[in-house]
Amino acid sequence: MSVVPAILITFRSVPPVDRSVSLGFQGFLVSLIATLPSSVFWGWIIDKSCVMWNTVCGQGSRGACQLYNTEKLRLMTHLTYSIM
């Protein structure tokens, strides 16, 4: 739902005394449900397109990506936008 219709629905369904609280709660829910998981999801897509990771000698953990498969990244990005 777009921002303006959501605000209009909130204004029409909440008493005038509680409108500011309801708008704050609505903004909190939008950031909790949409904004926070989206950064994790896009990070996962970018990580999946990595071909070569920087590794530190003696440690099993991976560092930053040194080389990306740009074709895979492009396809995954466009597929994700198409699904949305």
Image (cartoon, rainbow, N blue to C red):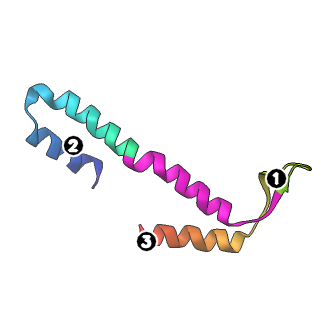
Residue topped by disc 3: 83
Q: Earlier in the sequence, mark 2 or mark 1?
A: 2
Q: Quadrant of the C terminus?
A: bottom left
Residue 74 lies left or right of residue 3; in this view the side is right
The amino acid marked with disc number 3 is: Ile
The magenta stretch is 33-53
The amino acid marked with disc number 2 is: Ile
**CB within 8 Å, label 3 to label 1:** no
Residue 73 image point, x, y percent? 65, 68
Q: CA distance from mark 2 to mark 3?
A: 26 Å
Mark carried by residue 44:
none
Residue 29 image point, x, y percent? 32, 42
Q: Nearer the viewer, mark 2 or mark 1?
A: 1
Label 3 neighbour load within 10 Å: few <14, some 14-19, many 20+: few
Please tell me in which quadrant of the rendered image residue 68 appears.
bottom right
The amino acid marked with disc number 1 is: Gly
Residue topped by disc 2: 7
Q: CA distance from mark 3 to mark 1?
A: 35 Å
Mark carried by residue 60:
1
